[in-house]
Image (tube, coloured by chain):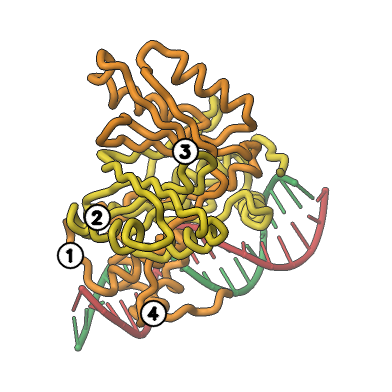
Chain colours: A yellow, B orange, C red, D green
Amino acid sequence: MVELDPIDAAIVRELQDDARLANNVLAARVGIAPSTCHGRVRSLFERGVIRGAHAEVDQASIGRPLQAMISVRLRPHARGELSAFAQAMTTLPEVLNVYFLAGADDFLIHVATAGSEELREFVLNHLSGTRDVAMTETSLIFEHLRGRPAEQGSARRAPQG
Amino acid sequence: MVELDPIDAAIVRELQDDARLANNVLAARVGIAPSTCHGRVRSLFERGVIRGAHAEVDQASIGRPLQAMISVRLRPHARGELSAFAQAMTTLPEVLNVYFLAGADDFLIHVATAGSEELREFVLNHLSGTRDVAMTETSLIFEHLRGRPAEQGSARRAPQG
DNA sequence: GATGAAATAAATTTGTG
DNA sequence: CACAAATTTATTTCATC
C-alpha cells in the first residue's frame, strides 16, 4: 500500500479516464510542470499503482456483439488446478475477464462472442464439456458500464484540441 | 460492425495490451510506416472500434484491497428505472464495473473497498438498504485476470527502449 | 492507401534552487 | 521535490507514388 498525495491521486484519476492523455496536458490539468508530472507518472508505474494502460475495444464492432457472464464451479478433484485453469481461460480470444470468487462458485468468466451459437460452443468446448467442470451458469450481458473515477472538486476539464 | 484488415487487427491488439505505446514503435511492430499507422489509429478511434484508453489501477495500492461482485435484483416497481439505477452506481467511487444481465438477477456490480466493514456499508447504504433493491448476493473476489488479446503468428515484439 | 521527408510538437534528461 | 531550459524523440502534415 502506497501513500498518494492529492496530485498523484489526480494523475491516477485522469489516466484512468484517458490513459493516452499527453503529458503536458496532464501536467496543466493537475497544476504542475510537465517535467514534474513526467516523474510522477513514471513513479506511479514503477510503484505498481498503475499496472498498465489498455485500449477499450468495442467488441460488437470487431464481430463479437454478444457478451455473457459465466459462473463456473470445478469438480473437487480439479480445485488444485483452479489457478491454471483460469489462466488458460485468459488466453482464449473470447475471454475478456476472469474473476476468482470465494463462495459457492469458483469463478466468473466474462466473454464476448459472435452470437448465441458461438457462445454455446464456447461453453461446451471449454467448460461444461470438459472433465474439470462441475457446473456452469450463463447470463447474457445487455450492457457493461465502467465505474467512472470519482470527480474531485478542484480539477477542471480542458477542451480537447 | 466494421471490417478490420489484419493490420488494423494487429494495432487493436497491441493497443489493448498497451494503450500508451508510442506511434513509431507501434508502426514498427505492425510493419507499416509511422505516418500510415497514425492515420489508422485515428481511424480506429473515429470509427468507434477503440472507445478509449484507461489506466489499470492496482486497487489495493490505493487503499481498496477488497474486491467483490454483487448480484442485485430490483423490486418490480423499480425495473423501469433500472438504467438510471445502474448509471448512478457508476458514479460511486467503490464501483469498478456494472454489468446489466438478462436472467434472474438484474445486474452485477464489481466493487473495490477498503475492507469488509466498508463492503458491508456499501451494500447496506446503496443496495440492500434502499427501497428499490429486492435482493443482493455478495461474493468476494480473490483475483481478477484480464483476458489477453490473442497472439497472432505474424507480429513480433520489438525490445523496449 | 502508403510512404519519406520536413515541420511542428511533445517527451525526457539534466542541472539548479 | 519542483522547476526551466536544453536535448532527444515522436507526431503530424504534405507532396508523391
Q: Is residue B25 above or below residue B72?
A: below
Label 1: how many residues lie within 10 Å, few (<14), some (14-19) or many (20+)?
few
Q: Secondary structure at mark 3?
A: strand
Q: Earlier in the sequence, mark 1 or mark 3?
A: 1
**Residue A81 is at least partly visible in this image:** yes
| Subunit that carries the residue with mark 3 | B
Q: Find disc 4 in the rendering and name its residue.
A: B155
Residue B96: numbered disc: 3
Q: Disc 1 and disc 3: Cα gap in Å?
A: 31 Å
Residue A142 rendering spot, x and y as whole percentages = 25, 39
Label 2: how many residues lie within 10 Å, few (<14), some (14-19) or many (20+)?
many
Q: Disc 3 and disc 4: Cα gap in Å?
A: 32 Å
Q: Earlier in the sequence, mark 4 or mark 1?
A: 1
Residue A48 rendering spot, x and y as whole percentages = 64, 53
Q: Secondary structure at mark 1?
A: loop
Indicate left or right for B125 with A124 as reference.
right
| Subunit that carries the residue with mark 4 | B
